[in-house]
Amino acid sequence: MLDTQQPDGTFERSWSLSEANAMFRAIHALRAAYQHHPLAHHGRLQPAITAAEGRLLATAHTDGGWGQTPTEPSDPISTAYTLTALAPAHQHTATIERGLAYLLRHQDADGGYTTSISDQAAPRPLRYSVPILTNNFVLLALTYLHPGLHLSSPHRGGRGPARQDRVRR
């Protein structure tokens, strides 16, 4: 994995069109390796983690989200991947708070996410959509950001609580 990291901190995107998907998986694997063997790989683990996290932190958009690549508009699934990657080391930073606010602004009235861009490409270059993936990865990000998070449910027969009231710590 260390040998496949690009100089900008990224990894090959594989089946996902979002560079943050490969990066969150790589960052978590590198952190696990570092926790078990911090001196392994001749001191290359922490610099690799730092490079990947630095890329994600540097590519946050002004709206608080992240796109599939830094030049593409923010979308909920790429933002969720990024928050999952950054949560363990950057949980209480302004960048993470803006990312969480981005997710809450783009949440549907029923609590889900149907407005995210499709993220799958296989066989390449054909794009296809699996809408539930956005919900899954947003929930994963929330569990990394706030392990004790309590999600409130929308009111029956109504639009549900205001977006900022849906998540309480």
Image (spheres, rainbow, N blue to C red):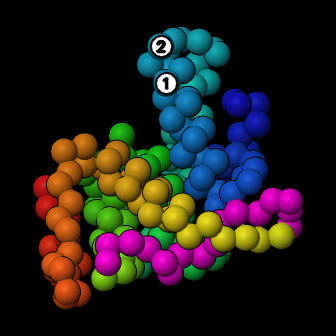
Residue 142 falls in image quadrant: bottom left
Q: Secondary structure at mark 1?
A: helix
Crowd around label 1: few <14 · some 14–19 · many ≥20 (10 Å): few
114 relative position to 168: left or right: right
Residue 67 position, x and y percent, is 57, 70
Q: CA distance from mark 2 to mark 1?
A: 6 Å
State the residue at coordinates (36%, 40%). 88
Tell me the kind of residue under disc 1: Ala
Residue 120 position, x and y percent, is 70, 63
Stretch of the chain drawn in magenta: 110-125
Query: Up-down: is 157 above or below 9?
Result: below
- Residue at the spot of label 1: 32
Q: Quadrant of the C terminus?
A: bottom left
In the picture, the disc for residue 143 is none
Q: Is residue 117 magenta?
A: yes
Query: Up-down: is 48 above or below 14?
Result: above
User: Pointers 2 and 1 in contact (CB under 8 A)?
Assistant: yes
- Residue at the spot of label 2: 36
Q: Secondary structure at mark 2?
A: helix
Residue 47 falls in image quadrant: top right
Q: Nearer the viewer, residue 67 or 5?
A: 67
